[in-house]
Image (cartoon, coloured by chain):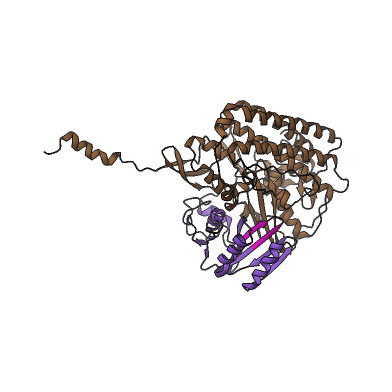
Chain colours: A purple, B brown
Amino acid sequence: MSETVTRLGGYAEEVGTKLTTLRKNESIVEVGQDNLKTFVSHLVNDLHVHHLMTITGLDLGQNLGITYHFSMERDTIHVRTLVPKTKPVAVSIVDIVPGSILYEMELHDMFGIEFVGNPWKDQKLLLPDDWPNDLPPPLLKSSKADQIRKRLGLEVAKQ
Amino acid sequence: MSATPDQQRREESAGLMEYSAESLVPFGPIHPALKEPEYFKLVLEGERIIDVIPRIGYVHRGLEKAAESRPWVQNMYMFERTCGICSFVHSLCYGQAVEELTMFQVPRRAKFIRTIIAEMERIHSHLLWVGLMGHWAGFDTLFMWVWNDREVVLDLVEAIAGNRVHKSMNAFCGVRRDMPENMEERIVERMKFLTDRARYYREIIDTEETMLKRTENIGRVSAETAEKLCAVGPMARYVGLRRDVRLNDPYAAYDEVPLDVVTTTDGDVHALLRLRLDELVASANMVTYAVQNLPDGPIRVKVPPIIPAGEHSSHCEAPRGEIFYYVKSSGGRTPERVKSRQPTMANLPTALEMLKGQTLADIPVVLTAIDPCFGCMDRMSFYDTETNRKWTWSGEELRQFGINYYFPERAKRKPALADLVGRSASVEQCSREEF
């Protein structure tokens, strides 16, 4: 474990959470929505972990998981935060990591999570402009491919 | 004195003449300068671009969703079809993430073969890109020469893997095909040829007026901006950032093969051209080393179809930059979630920054400079011209056809297959001899 990750582990305990090692050079830490911006800010500005690889959305039943994947030389650090499925609103980290802008837009399209503070949060990135609002966001487990195809009139007639 | 009609008209039209300083120009989604559909909203001031708003997703096929309903192994070959240029590295990256979950070790020989194919893919991708840059800069001779040389490396890939682009070489914890015998000499000789050609092209782009005029001082960003916007691959290295997964987090055999990471600090499109040609030479050297020092041993470990529960990520250096896969398993036959992030997505914010301040005419060159790449297909359509009949094959039907094509004797034992292809032709007609 590199010095950066050891220091991050210390900081995680200060803010009341824990860094778990998944394997050599890969660790995960779960942070609440309130602490997220301070945590990411510490990671980027104090520990100089600048590279955000991407943001992954996860359907965890009651909650939606948002995982920020940071990379620093040999280390991969996953920072996970949860938002309730009934009110999918999260804070945006665009002001700390400007490169996260498109990843947040992607999550908005695919999981319906609204990122407060993202300047482009109201426009679509990947989904078509005429995507019906009554359909659930496509990457939720409740969304079925057949349902989407039927609603969009894309059914392929089998011969 | 009241205003004359002439003066009045002039005053009235003055309001109309006041154009706003900014104009909005749509670029794409279908545009001659883009080989794949993508839409950019350009805010122009005269000829200068002052802001760009992207709109992507025209070829989004929902691979991540599709992966959740397919077995682990099938996903590997589906993700390989994410890209029609750097296909191998996608299956490699997905495979590595899954291998972490299985706890099996990849044999050393397989790691070397993976490195050889991955580097050959980089050579072919960089050659393709240099050709396209020549094309967009108005230097089509370069395009034709470079694409002719690209055939050399594609032939080698075909000799090793059996196919030029979609190699399907990877399996979990190994590779599916061993290196053919007596290839070493041929590969070393071809790599030397490609190195010489790359050096020659390097000389051309440094001296040829057409290339210099179109690429010098164009598409500049600062290292700080590229770092903040999380640029990857050549887009990070051309401003001096040493971001290369092969160096930072070695996978496959990169910790054993001597690696030469090329960076420059010039930071314009011309520097990108030089950088990619230098990387090509470095890749050729790596292939030569790996082929000459290829270890003996098995090439594959068999992995059970059920992957233990857990979550892991993996990243690899594709020709365009870092690709990233995140895999979550709940211990079943299909993944719980697969996330894939391609380098073009990571480089898009930097590309938008590069475009700002350039003229409208520079867009093709700058956009091609990031080497954009999108999309995939997983279905096949047929059209019978004689009867005007249209029909579609699903992935499963295609798979069955593939088995039928290679093993006609098996098809005869399975009457369901005859029904499948019998719509237009008999089973015998669909066998290898006919197609």
- The answer to whether residue B77 is seen in the rendering is no
Residue shown at the point (64%, 61%) measured from the top left: A47
Give the quadrant of the C terminus of chain B: top right
Q: Main secondary structure of the magenta part?
A: strand
Front-most of residues B163 and B193: B193
Residue shown at the point (63%, 32%) measured from the top left: B131
Q: Can residue B188 be found in the magenta stretch?
A: no
- The answer to whether residue B86 is seen in the rendering is yes
Residue at far left of view: B1
Side of A62 where B336 appears, left or right: right
> Residue B399 appears at what percent x and percent y?
70, 46
Residue at far right of view: B296
> Residue B23 appears at what percent x and percent y?
40, 42
Front-most of residues B233 and B426: B233
| B1, above or below A108, in the image | above
Question: How many badges with numbers are in the image?
Answer: 0
Side of A143 where B15 appears, left or right: left
> Residue B365 appears at what percent x and percent y?
55, 36
Give the quadrant of the N terminus of chain B: top left
Side of A82 where B106 appears, left or right: right
Q: Quadrant of residue A5?
A: bottom right
> Residue B20 appears at what percent x and percent y?
35, 43
Side of B18 where B396 appears, left or right: right
Q: Quadrant of residue B87?
A: top right
Residue shown at the point (67%, 35%) measured from the top left: B127
Q: Quadrant of residue A17?
A: bottom right
| A62, above or below B325, in the image | below
Query: Which stretch appears magenta?
Result: A67-78
